[in-house]
Amino acid sequence: MNHLGMVLQIWEQHQFYANRKKCAFGQPQIAYLGHRHIISGEGVSADPAKLEAMVGWPEPKNTTELRGFLGLTGYYRRFVKNYGKIVRPLTELLKKNSLKWTEMAALAFKALKGAVTTLPVLALPDLKLPFVTRVGKWNWSCFITREQACCVSQPRVF
């Protein structure tokens, strides 16, 4: 806490101020990004309330409901291994004008709901380890990722 005092003192000298209502010090975990993530010493995890919303989501009856579900689950895509492959049958339904629920869509919907019930806690980056930037292309798309190899079994991102 001594370092915190020094930082706050320097802020005050330069007329920077922290809003006490928005500050929390010495907490074992904090909610981040509008309570979408929980950050703790273990890493980054999904907010349990959001997970409950995904698991309890009813089968979509129209494209608006499907977009809502995919928007919510898509926010947590980095927690779900093979997210793109799992949701492909659902995203295909959005390309058509009407929602025609198929057995493949039902299986994908169920698989995605199952995947979010077992989300891992993602490890925080280790700033002592190097980062690797990868550039690639697939069909007509290009992508860039920053990755960090680590020797622990805890994933950093999927």
Image: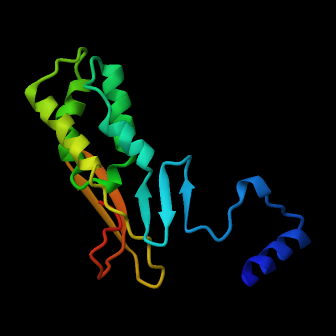
Q: Nearer the viewer, residue 65 or 27?
A: 27
Residue 52 image position (x, y, % from top left): 37, 41
Identify the image quadrant of the C terminus: bottom left
Q: Image point 28% across, 53% down: which residue?
A: 80
Q: Nearer the viewer, residue 23 or 94?
A: 23
Give the color scheme: rainbow, by chain, secondary structure or one colour.
Answer: rainbow
Q: Extreme top residue here?
A: 98
Residue 58 image position (x, y, % from top left): 29, 26
- Up/down of 3 relative to 80, above or below: below
Q: Image point 39% across, 70% down: which residue?
A: 123
Counting every numbered tag in the picture gives: 0
- Up/down of 16 relative to 116, above or below: below
Q: Nearer the viewer, residue 138 or 69?
A: 69
Q: Nearer the viewer, residue 6 or 139?
A: 6
- Up/down of 6 relative to 138, above or below: below
Side (left or right) of 38 relative to 64: right
Residue 11 image position (x, y, % from top left): 83, 70
Identify the image quadrant of the N terminus: bottom right
Q: Extreme left residue here?
A: 103
Residue 5 lies in quadrant: bottom right
Q: Image point 40% across, 76% down: which residue?
A: 131
Residue 75 lies in quadrant: top left
Side (left or right) of 6 relative to 85: right
Residue 148 image position (x, y, % from top left): 36, 74
Side (left or right) of 41 relative to 68: right
